[in-house]
């Protein structure tokens, strides 16, 4: 076909129409869109592909941080350095705004005129099947949250604690097993520990990943989270229901993951509906009959989310904390002293006033959560079209209905206005009397998010992290040794001694590589 023939062909008309459509759309988004005056990268103003591209590079958290700095007020930046005067709001997609302040945080996440973004529907297992994570409707969400909340509320924690101790004791034994070359990748062993705990809490099912590789695929969640994160940046995918969570999983792992999940759920069914206080949630939900396929799908949906919510997040927190302790001698010594002088024997290391009195331990956990928030990205919300005639105002900005809005956790946690020297690991900032204990700084600390969709597992997360670190430091000393992490890690963050994370919805990471030295004989049951 020569050029003259092509220009007359239907394909040429379609191509011309497509070009005209995109030129008009681009012009509208740049010059006439209600968000046209907000600063942001040109590509982001034109297309949602901007967010998807950086999510594909697992770098959206850092890019958001950089964009806030890049579009800050230049004269102010010159005076006080890059980090000080960041741009409080940027346009990160044609219809998206990301804020970077405590005021916006409250305006968005505590507002009843804002819902979770419909982009999260991409995580549905099947149309019509909702879980606590992807229920957009507020009433439906409340019902789901009530069920899930029962598993990990303060009262249930008393029942869960022995389960957590048993798994930590197995973890402690693993640390002293003779190995060649004696180096442990903490990401790997902590993932097994946290998933074993969650297996018991969700289904009373022993995954036994710490000692047996049979169920190892259940811990392999990174790739699915990664694809989900890309898709969430492009809500158009959710609108067309091109992908569902189950198809993504099948794409990546075949049926291995789902088979293990099915085994665990069947195991739980075989236990009957009564008598397991630690499984109130599953017990309640299991009142559905076998032929109610939608409800069964909902159980699977909730189980998948619950496992990841309780294990990936804690793996990230603890890996970062072990990294920072091994890289900061003074912090390490201060924490070791606190733990070894507070308790007189290992049996005393349990929830209660003594553990609560370990202020430096809590400060170290908070500082690890600040520098390495396990969900480092923007938790997207949507301004709803409602009958109230007043406009939705976020930090003084009028927000048109349907706009996606949010605060990026990583960017806020590294905002020097709230956290001076944001790339320094300084647990001291969390101790009484320090600047971080001011109400504004406290309010800018949001690893668990805030509002009606904030984390239900916060109390359990603090308990589990405290027990793991306190018990480990009671029995062992540890130090960093070189591992694959060293070759590319610290340069990635462009700051020394920063534990590198990738943003794959949940933080993805490797290491630290540590060597453990026994201080005392283990007195845990074998
Ligand atoms: C350090 C550990 C943890 C961190 C940093 C963390 C963080 C978060 C965040 C930021 C959210 C809000 C997500 C959103 O708005 O889209 C969330 C929700 C949730 N988390 Fe956690 N989490 C942790 C541990 C846990 C644990 C241990 C559990 C349960 C055993 C858990 C269960 C949940 C559930 C069920 C939700 C959904 C709440 C809702 O939508 O109403 N999390 N978590």
Image (spheres, helix red, strand yellow):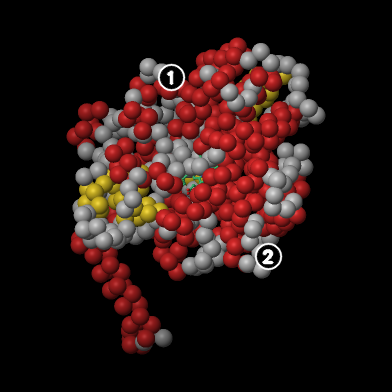
Q: Name which residue lies at 32% across and 37% down.
A: 102
Q: Secondary structure at mark 1?
A: loop
Of 12 and 511, nearer the camera is 511
Would you name the residue on which mark 2 appears?
Answer: 290
Would you name the residue on which mark 1 appears?
Answer: 431
Placement of the N terminus among the 4 image quadrants: bottom left
Q: Secondary structure at mark 2?
A: loop
Please indicate, yes or no, whether residue 390 appears anywhere in the rendered image.
yes
Q: Name which residue lies at 46% across and 22% down.
A: 427
Of 366 and 79, nearer the camera is 366
Q: Is residue 143 above or below residue 368?
A: below
Q: Name which residue lies at 58% across and 57% down.
A: 301
Quadrant in the rendering for residue 493: top left
Q: Name which residue lies at 47% across and 60% down.
A: 121
Residue 520 horizontal side relative to residue 94, left or right: right
Return the mark for residue 524: none
Instruction: Give the percent coordinates (x, y) of residue 247.
Output: 58, 64
Please indicate, yes or no, whether residue 312 appears anywhere in the rendered image.
no
First in residue order: circle 1 vs circle 2: 2
Placement of the C terminus among the 4 image quadrants: top right
Residue 416 horizontal side relative to residue 131, left or right: left
Q: Residue furthest right?
A: 526
Instruction: Give the percent coordinates (x, y) of residue 109.
Output: 36, 45
Q: For the residues carrying marks 1 and 2, which lies nearer the camera in this image?
A: 2
Residue 175 horizontal side relative to residue 440, left or right: right
Q: Residue furthest front?
A: 274
């Amino acid at each position: 076909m020569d050029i003259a023939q092509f220009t007359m062909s239907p394909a040429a008309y379609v191509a011309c129409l497509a070009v005209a459509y995109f030129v008009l759309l681009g012009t509208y988004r740049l010059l006439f869109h209600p968000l046209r005056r907000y600063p942001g990268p040109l590509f982001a103003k034109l297309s949602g592909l901007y967010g998807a591209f950086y999510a594909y590079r697992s770098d959206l958290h850092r890019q958001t941080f950089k964009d806030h700095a890049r579009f800050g007020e230049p004269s102010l930046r010159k005076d006080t350095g890059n980090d000080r005067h960041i741009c409080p709001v940027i346009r990160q997609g044609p219809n998206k705004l990301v804020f970077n302040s405590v005021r916006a945080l409250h305006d968005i996440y505590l507002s009843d005129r804002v819902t979770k973004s419909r982009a999260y529907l991409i995580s549905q297992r099947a149309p019509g099947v909702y879980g606590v994570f992807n229920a957009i409707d507020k009433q439906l969400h409340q019902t789901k949250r009530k069920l899930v909340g029962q598993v990990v509320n303060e009262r249930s924690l008393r029942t869960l604690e022995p389960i957590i101790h048993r798994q930590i004791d197995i973890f402690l034994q693993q640390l002293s097993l003779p190995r060649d070359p004696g180096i442990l990748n903490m990401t790997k062993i902590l993932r097994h520990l946290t998933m074993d705990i969650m297996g018991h809490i969700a289904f009373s099912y022993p995954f036994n990943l710490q000692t047996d590789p049979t169920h190892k695929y259940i811990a392999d969640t990174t790739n699915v989270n990664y694809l989900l994160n890309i898709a969430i940046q492009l809500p158009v995918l959710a609108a067309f229901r091109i992908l569902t969570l189950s198809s993504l999983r099948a794409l990546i792992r075949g049926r291995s993951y789902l088979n293990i999940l099915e085994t665990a759920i069947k195991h739980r069914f075989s236990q009957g509906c009564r008598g397991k206080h630690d499984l109130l949630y599953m017990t309640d939900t299991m009142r559905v009959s076998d032929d109610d396929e939608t409800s069964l799908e909902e159980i699977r949906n909730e189980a998948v989310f619950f496992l990841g919510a309780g294990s990936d997040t804690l793996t990230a927190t603890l890996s970062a904390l072990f990294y920072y302790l091994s890289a900061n001698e003074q912090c390490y010594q201060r924490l070791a002293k606190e733990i070894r002088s507070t308790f007189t024997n290992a049996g005393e290391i349990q929830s209660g006033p003594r553990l609560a009195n370990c202020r430096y331990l809590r400060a170290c956990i908070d500082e690890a959560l600040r520098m390495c928030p396990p969900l480092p990205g923007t938790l997207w919300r949507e301004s709803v079209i409602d009958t109230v005639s007043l406009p939705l105002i976020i930090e003084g900005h009028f927000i048109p209905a349907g706009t996606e809005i949010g605060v990026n956790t990583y960017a806020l946690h590294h905002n020097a206005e709230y956290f001076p020297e944001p790339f320094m690991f300084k647990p001291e900032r969390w101790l009484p009397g320090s600047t971080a204990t001011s109400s504004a700084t406290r309010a800018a600390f949001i690893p668990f998010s805030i509002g009606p969709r904030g984390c239900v597992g916060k109390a359990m997360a603090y308990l589990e992290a405290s027990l793991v670190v306190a018990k480990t430091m009671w029995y062992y000393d540890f130090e960093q040794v070189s591992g694959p992490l060293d070759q590319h890690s610290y340069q990635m963050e462009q700051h020394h001694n920063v534990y590198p994370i990738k943003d794959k919805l949940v933080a993805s990471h490797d290491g630290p590589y540590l060597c453990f030295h026994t201080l005392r004989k283990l007195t845990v049951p074998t």
